[in-house]
Image (cartoon, rainbow, N blue to C red):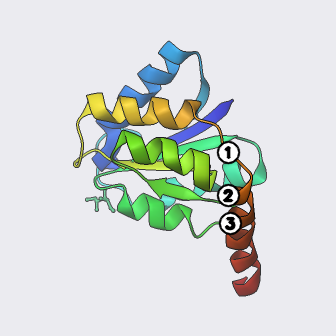
Amino acid sequence: MKVAIASDHGGVNLRKEIMNLMDELGIEYEDFGCEGTGSVDYPDYALPVAERVASGEFDRGILICGTGIGMSIAANKVKGIRCALVHDVFSAKATRQHNDTNVLAMGERVIGPGLAREIAQAWLTTEFEGGRHQRRVIKITDIEGKYR
Ligand code: RB5
């Protein structure tokens, strides 16, 4: 699995934590910034990750900002992206099993690093269940076709 990861200035510390986790798990990833801790605009970092996941260049994306909200909104504008903003382990597993989410968003100002690591690990290692959930995901994709 190849993961694209990025954050804005509000998510720098948590991004490093999650990159350490992926090193420990032996998961391949590429870091798309941001550099340093100066103020930047989260859509500028959500877009490169979302585009690379949508194109198939990367299997999954992880986006972190202060709340995770801006990153998730921006990522979900890209056709083919199903980004979930997650701050608990149950939802991390469920959104993989039921929604086949391909991007995970988290907020560094919302949860601590220990929980964020558990969420990321659960999300990265849980498979999509398919079946009735596949039908629903297809209906989400159909909505994209209707408006673009
Ligand atoms: C930046 O201050 C902050 O707005 C951003 O990290 C994020 O929380 C936006 O949704």
The answer to whether any part of residue 40 appears in the image is: yes
* For marks 1 and 3 on the same chain, the one whose residue lies earlier in the sequence: 1
Circle 3: element type: helix
Most distant residue in the front direction: 132
Image marks 3 and 2: residues in contact by CB distance under 8 Å: yes
Residue highlighted by disc 1 = 129
Label 3 is placed on what type of residue? Arg
Q: Residue at x 46, y 44 (%)?
A: 92
Q: Residue at x 53, y 50 (%)?
A: 95
Q: Residue at x 77, y 79 (%)?
A: 145
Image quadrant in which the N terminus is located: top right
Residue highlighted by disc 3 = 136
Q: Is 24 placed above or below 128 here?
A: above
Query: From the viewer's perspective, is 16 left or right of 98?
Result: left
Image marks 1 and 3: residues in contact by CB distance under 8 Å: no
CB of residue at label 1: within 8 Å of ligand 1?
no
Residue highlighted by disc 2 = 133
